[in-house]
């Protein structure tokens, strides 16, 4: 099984101080989907900084490619 997820965020969500573990310290949750430590942010979102609005990208094996919108079986049902 594989899964494509469309994400538009370009940075993490920092948790409230009450959510932070005293031993782990500052924790941010990845919202871009590129983190190698998902669900935690590892700074990989920096790769999205020069993305163009309205363009769809696929990140695979460290490479970024622009693609036409991904069409799924669900789109055919509409
Ligand atoms: S938000 Fe995804 S790596 Fe930081």
Image (tube, rainbow, N blue to C red):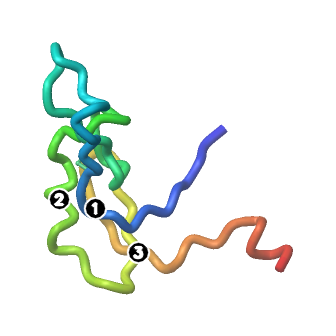
Give the alpha-carbon distance from disc 2 to disc 1, as whole Å: 9 Å
Image quadrant in which the C terminus is located: bottom right
Snapshot quadrant of residue 38: top left
Position of residue 38 in the picture relative to residue 77 (left or right) = left
Mark 2 falls on what kind of element?
helix
Instruction: Write the residue at 19% across / 48% down.
Output: 44
Instruction: Name above or below for residue 7 compared with residue 76.
Output: above
Where does label 2 land, which residue?
47
User: Which of these two is toward me, 46 or 30?
Assistant: 30
Q: CA distance from mark 1 to mark 3?
A: 10 Å
* Secondary structure beneath label 1: strand
Residue at image location 60% in from the left, 43% down from the top: 2
Which residue was labeled with disc 1? 64
| Earlier residue among tags 3 and 2 | 2
Disc 3 on helix, strand or loop?
strand
Kindly tell me whether mark 3's CB lies below 8 Å from ligand 1: no
The one nearer the camera, 23 or 65, is: 23
Other residues around mark 3 within 10 Å, as few (<14) / some (14–19) / many (≥20): some
Q: Quadrant of the N terminus?
A: top right
Q: Residue furthest right?
A: 77
Q: Nearer the viewer, mark 2 or mark 1?
A: 2
Q: Which residue is mark 3?
A: 56
* Of the image marks 1 and 3, the number of the one nearer the N terminus: 3
Residue 52 drawn at (x, y percent) = 26, 82
Left or right of 4 in this view: 74: right
Question: How many residues crowd mark 1 within 10 Å: few (<14), some (14–19), many (20+)?
Answer: few
Q: Give residue 29's position: percent from left, percent from top.
A: 31, 42
Asked if ligand 1 lies within 8 A of label 2, the reply is no
């Amino acid at each position: 099984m594989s899964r494509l997820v469309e994400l538009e965020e370009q940075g993490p969500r920092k948790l409230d101080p009450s959510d932070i573990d005293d031993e782990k310290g500052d924790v941010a949750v990845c919202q871009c989907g590129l983190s190698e430590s998902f669900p935690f942010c590892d700074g990989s979102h920096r790769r999205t900084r020069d993305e163009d609005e309205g363009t769809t990208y696929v990140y695979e094996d460290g490479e970024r490619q622009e693609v036409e919108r991904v069409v799924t079986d669900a789109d055919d049902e509409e």
